[in-house]
Amino acid sequence: MKHRVVFLDDEGIGPGVVTPGLPFAHEWVSHSYTQPEQLLERLAGATVALTCSVPLREEHLAQLPDLQLISLAMTGTDIVDMDYCRARGITVTNVPGYATNTVAEHSIAMMFELFRRVASYHHLMQQVHSGAREARNIYFDYPIRDLCGRVLGIVGNGPIARRVAELGRAIGMSVIVHDRGGRYMGPDFVPLEALLQRSDVLMINCPLTEETHDLLGAAQLARMKPEAVIVNTGRGGVVNEAALIEALEQGRLGGAALDVLEHEPVQPDNPIFRLAGHPNFILNPHVAWSSQDAMQGLIDRAIGNIVQFVESTNCSNLRAGGIR
């Protein structure tokens, strides 16, 4: 059987990343990005869909009778209607753990910026150079705070969360963890209420599910220390963005750094841009996962999942009396 493999959004792996070849008969089609209205045309006749971020919902999948495999070049599976795929016999694979180090390091970098203000003072020096600011011996525009001795609270207990905890302890922080699924009950586990009340830095390192959607709303944010900061490199939607905007605008929260939003890609009219000039707010365009090392490992494993699927299918067909 000759497979038709369609990469829906090859822009998601970035420049300099090499896509491995496929060792079986196939037709390869690649697009930079695919909009919802383009899905059916581009996946017509496809047996394999490869994607980094394009949602595949039931209304599309129901019209793609040839599709056998969805290979997700990402950690989660929330962009696919999994119940429908299970019912239809469409295999879905993903790449868990590929970005453990890179997302954890990005989380720590965001935390450092909120506390140490390295980039903020760099921009201030640029203003001095341009003449927009007076040259002085010392500046106190952005308060600098130490992280050693602070409490790092983490929502989640997967590989990324555990790596964040390891890095936090290396800095000298005390680490507490809330595993929202209740599977982890180690000595550093605390209920969500205690996590909110005790954390100086609250890290979101959990997936978006029905249970975690709006996990941190206005009531939860109100329980946090007024000088505490939130760093979300997990999934948008875990933190209610309207409540976060209000808390920051009213000075009831010390700061926030977001790499993810509930609605992506972010549009210019997104209310989050009300915080664009806020001194204690950082917004990144979902890039925590995208180090060169992580992206190469991601595409290697996503392609490997396709190869493994085809090889296992061929073996099953041979056992059944021949490849159909």
Image (spheres, grey):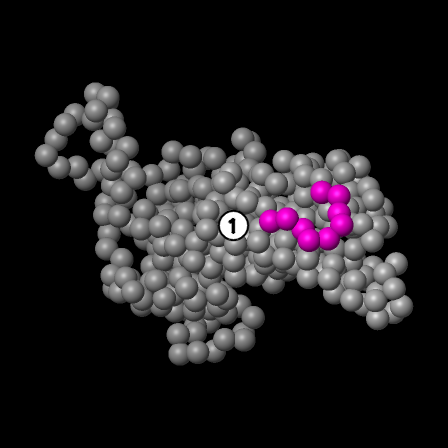
Does residue 106 appear left or right of residue 316 in this picture?
Answer: left
Q: Quadrant of the C terminus?
A: bottom right
Q: Nearer the viewer, residue 287 or 195?
A: 287
Where residue 265 sits: x, y (%)? 58, 39
Q: Main secondary structure of the magenta part?
A: loop
Q: Is residue 63 above or below residue 317?
A: above
Amino acid type indicated by mark 1: Gln
Q: Residue at x 69, y 53 (%)?
A: 23
Q: Residue at x 51, y 49 (%)?
A: 295
Could you tell me if residue 153 is visible in this image? Answer: no
**First to last magenta residue range:** 20-28
Could you tell me if residue 141 is visible in this image? Answer: yes
The answer to if 26 sits in the magenta stretch is: yes
Residue matched to label 1: 296
Q: Residue at x 46, y 35 (%)?
A: 274
Q: Is residue 43 above or below residue 208?
A: above
Q: Residue at x 62, y 54 (%)?
A: 302
Q: Nearer the viewer, residue 157 or 288?
A: 288
Where residue 57 sits: x, y (%)? 75, 49
Does residue 197 appear left or right of residue 316 in this picture?
Answer: left
Where residue 11 sits: x, y (%)? 58, 38
Give the SS element for disc 1. helix
